[in-house]
Amino acid sequence: MSAKSMMLEVTDLKVHFPVTKGLFQRRVADIKAVDGVSFTLQRGETLGLVGESGCGKTTTGRAILQAIKPTHGGVKYWDQEMERYVDLTTLTSEELRRMRKQIQVIFQDPYGSLNPRMTCGDIVGEPLQIHGLAKGNALEEKVEELLTLVGIHPYMASRYPHEFSGGQRQRIGIARALASSPSFIVCDEPISALDVSIQAQIINLLEELQDQFGLTYLFIAHDLAVVRHISDRIAVMYLGKMMELAGHTELYERPLHPYTKALLSAIPVPDPRVEAKRERIILQGDVPSPMNPPSGCVFHTRCPAAAGRCRTETPTWRDMGTPQAPHFVACHLA
């Protein structure tokens, strides 16, 4: 792996939210939303980040963007303008403002992420104005070009968000993210609020844009079938920790962690004969509270294969794959 091919390196990322009590807001505990996540992301790659609701996927994405300040850890990013790596966690607000051109986000909710008082054209043009990239006629032309790129006719630029469907609104959100010509985009469950028929269109659009502009994606989702389609590698999270990370084919054909196996067993197969023979893994109990996570392996309270050391000893993050196809897992029994 050459250094310049690496776009992003996240090291031991932690986000702990304080829990306070009483008149003087005394800190009594921490909610460990993200607790020691590490991974790298190559230029032009899509990394899928999956897990059930509340596992820390979105918080990880926002901590990388510095929308939430991490409690601990580093986020090393290749700054294309300066041609060097910078740690986003150490930057001042002014330095982060400059970096926003290169790092963008597509939000989950196309209904709540667009300002209802701004027209479609103003929403897409706002990043261009903020970063001083275009004004006047050049701004109008760039907005028309971006709208056309995502499949919205330029004559709709004067319309307001409530006049568009959910899929169209998400296309506007994608156009806004592309406005500053970024190299890295965090896609925070961009299709989960859309109809199934529209989901495929948005996924295809994201793939076309990636090929056209060489974009790098962190794709956060909970639909494993969608993640397999768009991702080069997939990372599985549970209760703020990384459970497994491998190439998409490797992860689906040879899952090593019991939690990954349980998630994959829940994906329906269209062939009824295959579906009838398949073994479903039903996890017992509920997800523990991130304010008081279990000792040892955080998954041991629901793991069907948990042994004695799983309850007391935290599993190490180790590579069980090959040099050509790394396969990382945090499990004593893998």
Image (cartoon, helix red, strand yellow):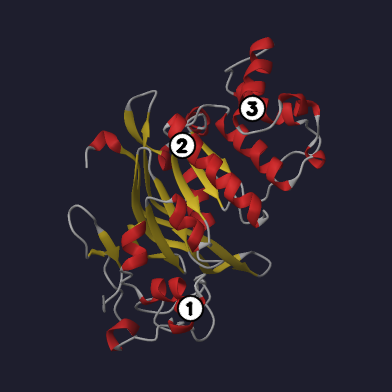
Query: Which residue extends farthest left?
Result: 323
Q: Residues within 10 Å of mark 3 (few under 14, many from 20)?
A: few
* Callout 3 secondary element: helix
Specify which label sits upstream in the sequence, 3 or 2: 3
Q: Give residue 110's position: percent from left, percent from top.
A: 69, 46
- Between circles 3 and 1, the one closer to the viewer is 1
Mark 3 → mark 1, Cα distance in angstroms: 42 Å
Residue at the spot of label 1: 275
Image quadrant containing the C terminus: bottom left
Proximity of marks 3 and 2: CB atoms separated by less than 8 Å: no
Choose the circle earlier in sequence order: 3 or 1. 3
- Residue 310 appearing in the image: yes
Which is nearer the eye, 272 or 32?
A: 272
Residue occupying the point 50% across, 45% down: 186
The residue carrying mark 3 is 148
Q: Indicate left or right for 84 with 149 as reference.
A: left
Image location of residue 116, percent across then percent down: 79, 39
